[in-house]
Image: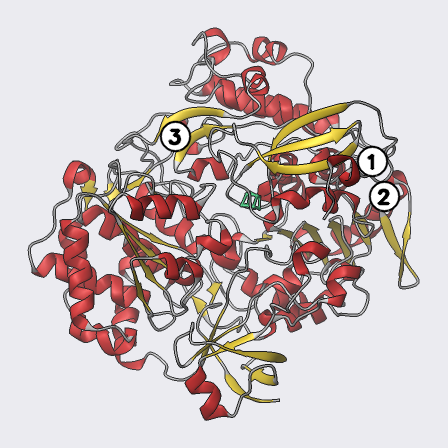
Amino acid sequence: MTDTIEEALVTTAGVSPASGRRTAFRVCPLCEAGCGLEITLDGDAVGRIRGDRDDVFSHGFICPKGSTLRQLHVDPDWLRQPVVKRDGRFVPVSWDEAFAEVDRLLGPVLAERGRDALAVYIGNPTVHSLGAQLFARPLVRALGTPNVFSASTVDQRPKEVASALMFGGSLTVPVPDVDRTDLLLMLGANPYESNGSLATAPDWPGRIEALIARGGRLVVVDPRRTRTAEAASEHLAIRPGTDPFLLMAVVQVLGAEGLVDTGPAGPHLDGVDEVLALAAPFTPEAVAPVTGLDAEVIRGLARDLAAAPTACVYGRMGTTTALFGTVSSWLVDVINALTGNLDRPGGAMFTKAAAGAANTRGRGGTGRGVRLHRRHSRVRGLPETLGELPVACMAEEIDTPGEGQVRALVTVAGNPVLSTPNAGRLDAALATLEAYVAVDPYINETTRHADVILPVPSALQRSHYDLALLQLAVRNVAHYSPPVLPLDDGQLSEWEVLARLALVAQGMGADADPALVDDLTARALVDAAVADETGPLAGRPGEEILAALGERRGPERLLDLMVRTGPYGDGFGARPGGLTLDVLIENPHGVDLGPLEPRLPEVLRTPSGTVDLAPEMIVADVPRLAAALDTFAEGFVLVGRRDLRSNNSWMHNVEVLVKGKPRCTLHVHPDDAERLGLADGADAEVRSRTGRVVIPVEVTDGIRPGVVSIPHGWGHDAEGVELSVARRHAGVNSNELADHELVDPLTGTAVLNGIPVEVAPA
Ligand code: SF4
């Protein structure tokens, strides 16, 4: 720790420090919370980073990760120029050489085997970058491959699919109105450590403490006594993967006891009777043995949800990364609807985002819905959802010979070797590729297999707007951040990297101008906006709109267009006083657009114009759930866990976040430890069908007997990884244990919580 700002000031790598003290404000892009930061600089030297007390959403809250943007920016392992592999070693090259190498590598694969031989993986950090969000899509289109994978199919696709089927849009996800609810039932989520997910809200701890202080209740359902569970009014230590049985039983009680009251959403709901009929066999007594919860506790929970003035059910990782992930995700909102809490203050509500949301465009209240399972993966026949294949089949698409075998790969951020199931097989498969191009700042467990790595600037050198995450916020907010620091000499912005890569993939050569992609993207967005007969630009000449966007280029031009044509935008003059990018720039602490308001039916994009409470695809999966009542596997299972100082695999190269007691340990209940002969601090061997790890034991009564836990994102000791700090705190890769064949069949999402394992002393 340094005592003064002066001591803390550092000269950023590759940047000549300009003089002059200044303060910059920007949104932290590291997780879904989107906290406002106040950054003290002297010229280009970064000093203190703390929470922005004037931020309209976070009000000064910050977690330990937020203040480490400086460390990330100056990390010597962060690549500042492209590298290509020569004789097994990465060597720095110019951008022109790097793109020429990409062209040289991808060209023959595409020419000889076609686009089926190519795959692309879009990693989770992409959603935390404005440039990547806007330009990854044109890249994917330019690659033209059916083999599109993303981090969404690691853990959230079940919720997206359930929302798409019920409401007509994959990001039309009701979020808990945590600031106004009286009772929050939270399943498989730990926002005290993760800062929330699919429910954007800075300072979850403060919001939960406020809920309890105003006389509300938080009930946490989790096999572990997490920090969130410790703060809760009640903790139900359920058996992993059995949430849908609990939720079905709640629905059964609501129906059997005449507690259904759909409230204001009632006229917009379709399928109430069908859902109640489906739930009939799942009585609390029937599900008690499989869930490990007392039948009367389940019954009481249902009654409480029905009786509370307002209540909300919210499910996350534990519910979506399980065998019945889509069914669980669906049931969460079924209960919100049946208790009258869907779309009402204090319940589960829909955000109205300022930019980029499909559910604010076009005619509201009806739509085309979504088409799912339009094709299946080559090797195992896993279903496509939302244009992507599940990551659970990525390795086999690479290592299984035959027509359409993937031989070339492009990754944009992410680290699938640490974050996707059966990681060992994927690691081996990547080594066999004929061409692999990574857009990434690090030589990590995944990108060490690349032939070319194209690095992106640090977060402080990028502008930011949470296009996706602000569609899931618990309050309507808009917040744009310009770059805090300039690019170094010779650095390319992220959008230019992605655009040039797209042009190479389209056969336009290594030196094509990225402005081509920018102009085409802007033109396409303008054309869509003027074609929207319900929008503010209906019928106006596209050229006029493009001219009105002025000199801006890249993400800023596209964002300005999206904001101005959004629900709060100025409509290019049609709505004087409305939002523009200039207005956002004038408000560095963000613009508060107010609490969530009811949006039914205009938020819907289903063909029926109603909330489909009984989507055919999900209803067809209920018999599988019923059959599992008697067959749900007994035995030891592995679940994951989060840590406040960690963020998947991203933050392990920051010393201040990884120092101290090792956190990659095996949590074991004392009874299990005694029975298995496991000693605290000694090593245990954990085996699954797909892998084996040796890991230190941490005995704790904060976990349910029969369950063990390992955090994911670790395992940094592979040969060739150039993460000097992370390597010293390597840990083990828990995804070597995740079985790629154990999936939710509706989405192909693999089980990450509830993996059958055997545990023994090492
Ligand atoms: S909670 Fe998330 S957004 Fe907020 S400071 Fe921490 S990492 Fe950044």
Mark linked to residue 81? 2
Confirm or deny contact between disc 1 and disc 2 (CB under 8 A).
yes
The Cα atoms of the two marked residues, 3 and 1, are separated by 36 Å
Between 759 and 398, the residue placed more toward the observer is 759
Report crowding for label 3: few under 14, some 14 to 19, many 20 or more residues within 10 A (C-alpha).
many
Dot 2: what SS? loop
Residue 723 in sight in this render: no
Q: Residue tagged by mark 1?
A: 491
Between 350 and 625, the residue placed more toward the observer is 350
Mark linked to residue 166? none
Residue 408 on image: x %, y %: 73, 57
Residue 139 on image: x %, y %: 66, 40
Tell me how the rendering is colored.
secondary structure
Residue 360 on image: x %, y %: 40, 28
> Identity of the amino acid at label 2?
Gln
Q: Residue tagged by mark 3?
A: 352
> Identity of the amino acid at label 3?
Lys
Q: Is residue 468 left or right of residue 131?
A: left
Tell me which corner region of the image, top left, top right, bottom left or bottom right, holds residue 8.
Answer: top right
> Which residue is rendered at x = 70% and y = 51% of the image?
410
- The correct choice, above or below, for 659 with respect to 77 in the image is below
Does the beta carbon at disc 2 come under 8 Å from ligand 1? no
Mark 3 or mark 1: name the one nearer the start of the chain: 3
Tell me the quarter of the image containing the C terminus. Answer: bottom right
Tell me which corner region of the image, top left, top right, bottom left or bottom right, holds residue 704.
Answer: bottom left
Q: Is residue 601 left or right of residue 497?
A: left
Mark 2 or mark 3: name the one nearer the start of the chain: 2
Quadrant containing ligand 1: top right
> Which residue is rendered at x = 26% and y = 59% of the image?
619
